[in-house]
Amino acid sequence: MMLKTRNEKGFTLIELMIVVAIIGILAAIAVPNFIAYRNKSRVAACVSTAESMRGCLAGYAVDSEGNQFPDATRAGTWDLFVTACNNNGGTLAATEALQGYTPGSFEYVGTDSESAECNLASGPECALYQITVECSGVPTDMKGSTIVVTSTGVAKQSS
């Protein structure tokens, strides 16, 4: 008498369900971490660009009479700011979006040339400035979604 042996190969439905469940658990853990790392890298890129902006404005001040920063008439819009920075060693992109900032978020505040802090003899240039930009693609409640640049440093803030 000859016995038949079952020689079937493959996975059972239970085994497949267990594998799918394990993959789902791993994905549930990995995806939020990936998103957090992506947002942190965007903030780091924005801060790096902000430090570059500070360097450009320092170069501007060194070359200007009275060693002063530009006022809003020379750097108040992104286009004017890019021109001022790129003429002083910067490599800023033509638009905020290409630079990694939210379009329309750029704000440059320079001390007005008629204020006491400015050297009127040197023209419309000022001693102080503040730049505010928002990092593109970063949640507004995350620290670093808004970057504030001054002559003394770069600060990461949330909106």
Image (cartoon, rainbow, N blue to C red):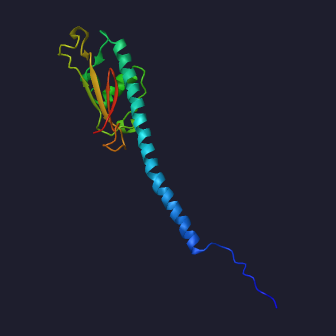
**Residue in the picture at 26% in, 19% down:** 128
Q: Quadrant of the N terminus?
A: bottom right
Using the image, determine if residue 8 lies above or below residue 132.
Answer: below
Closer-to-camera residue (158/105): 158
**Residue in the picture at 43% in, 27% down:** 91
x then y, percent, for residue 124? 24, 16
Query: Which quadrant would residue 65 be assigned to in this image?
Result: top left
x then y, percent, for residue 155? 33, 29
User: Is residue 34 shown left or right of residue 11?
Assistant: left
User: Is residue 31 shown left or right of residue 128?
Assistant: right
**Residue in the picture at 30% in, 17% down:** 69
Using the image, determine if residue 111 lies above or below residue 22.
Answer: above
Query: Which quadrant would residue 38 be assigned to in this image?
Result: top left
Using the image, determine if residue 7 lies above or below residue 129.
Answer: below
Seen as rendered, the residue at the extreme right is 1
Q: Quadrant of the C terminus?
A: top left
Closer-to-camera residue (79/46): 46
- In this rendering, the count of numbered labels is 0
x then y, percent, for residue 10? 65, 73
Query: Which quadrant would residue 92 be assigned to in this image?
Result: top left
x then y, percent, for residue 25? 49, 59
